[in-house]
Amino acid sequence: MTSYGVHASHEQVHPSESLSAVRHAEQAGFDAAMCSDHFSPWSERQGQSTFAWSWLGAALEATSLPFGVVNAPGQRYHPAIIAQSIGTLAEMYPGRFWAALGTGEASNEHITGDAWPRKGLRTARLRECVDIIRALLAGEEVSHDGLVTVDRARVWTRPDEPPPLIGAAVSVETARWCAEWADGLITVNAPPEQLRRMVDAYRDAGGRGKLHLQVHLSWDPDEDTAVRVAHEQWRSNVFAPPVCWDLDTAEAFDVASADVTPAKVAEVVNISSDLGRHAAWLREYADLGFDELYLHHVGQELDPFIDAFGAKVLPEVRS
C-alpha cells in the first residue's frame, strides 16, 4: 500500500506555520511527512531558512507521523554531527525517522568558505560520509583521513536499530550508484519514462528498501491562481544539473529565472485546479513502484491544499 505524505518546504514557509501544517495534515489523513534541509531559499520570494533539525524534533513530538529529511553531509555538516543528530531523533522516536543523503547544492554549502568541489569529488565525499555515519550509528569509534577527516569520534546516544539511510538521486546514473549503499531511494517527480529508468536502474543494481518520491504540485480551485502561484514560487527551480547545483545565492537564481515562463514551470510542477487530475498523477507514480509519495504544494498557503487533498484526493488514490 502506497503511503501519502506531505513535504514541509523550509525554504518557503515559516517554521511555526510548517509545524501547524503537519499537525493539520495528520488530522486530514496524511500518512507521513518529510522536509528539506536548506540554509538558503531558491529565491528571495521564498524568503525562509528554517534549521531542519530543530524543527524535526518539534514536529515528531507534535504528531505521530513518521518523518524524513534530505541532507548533504560533508561540507556544511560534518558527518559525525549528522550521525549524532540522526541517532538522537531515532532514539527518541523509534521507527519514525529516516534520513536521505545527497551531494548537496552550492547555494547551501558555500557558506563555509570552502571551495565547491566538482561533482565527482562531491560523490566520493558523500560515499565516505555514508560509511562514517553508518559506523558511528553502529557504535564504533571512527577515525578517518580522506575527503573528510574524523578523529576518534563516537556517538554514545543511539537507537536500538539504526534508521534507514536513503540515497537521493535525480539521474539514472546516481540512482544506480545509490544501490551500492542505500536503504532506499528518493527522487523528485519527472516524466514517467525518466522515473521508470531510475527505478529500474536502482533495482537492477540490487537496490533495496522503499522508493520515495517528492511530488511538486500547485493546486487552487482557480486554474489561473494555481499557475500564478507555481510561477511565482517555483520558477527558480526549473534548472537541470549542473546549474541547480552550482548557482550559489538566491539572488543568482532570481536573475537566472527572470525569463522562465509558466509553461516551463509546468514541466517540473504538476499544476491543475482539477483534483482528479492530481489523483491521476499520483496513481501513475504509485504504479511505477514508488512506496511513499510526499506531496509538496509549492505555494506558501498550505491549509486549503491539505483540506482539499485530504478530503478528495487521498480517498480516491487509496480506493
Image: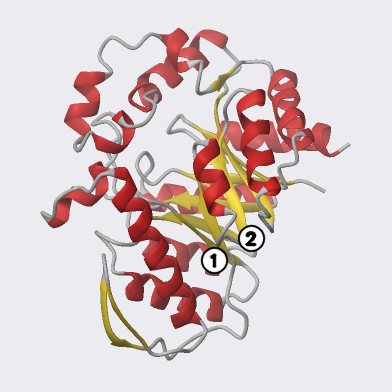
Q: Earlier in the sequence, mark 1 or mark 2?
A: 1
For badge 2, the amino acid type reads: Leu
Q: Given contact means CB atoms under 8 Å apart, are the residues at marks 1 and 2 in contact?
A: yes
Q: Which residue is mark 1?
A: 60
How crowded pointer 2 is (Cα within 10 Å; few <14, some 14-19, many 20+) is rated as many
C-alpha separation, residue under disc 1 versus residue under disc 2: 7 Å
- The quadrant where residue 79 appears: bottom left
The residue closer to the viewer here, 209 or 212, is: 209
Q: Position of residue 172 (x, y in %)?
A: 55, 37
Q: Position of residue 128 (x, y in %)?
A: 38, 66
| Residue in the image at 55% along x and 58% along y | 166
- The quadrant where residue 95 appears: bottom right
SS for dot 1? helix
Please say if 305 is above or below 20.
above
Task: Using the image, tell me which numbered label, if any, was put on residue 65.
Answer: 2
| Residue in the image at 40% along x and 17% along y | 231
- The quadrant where residue 132 appears: bottom left
Task: Using the image, tell me which numbered label, if any, was put on residue 299.
Answer: none
Which colour scheme appears in the figure?
secondary structure
For badge 1, the amino acid type reads: Leu
316 left or right of 130 in image: right
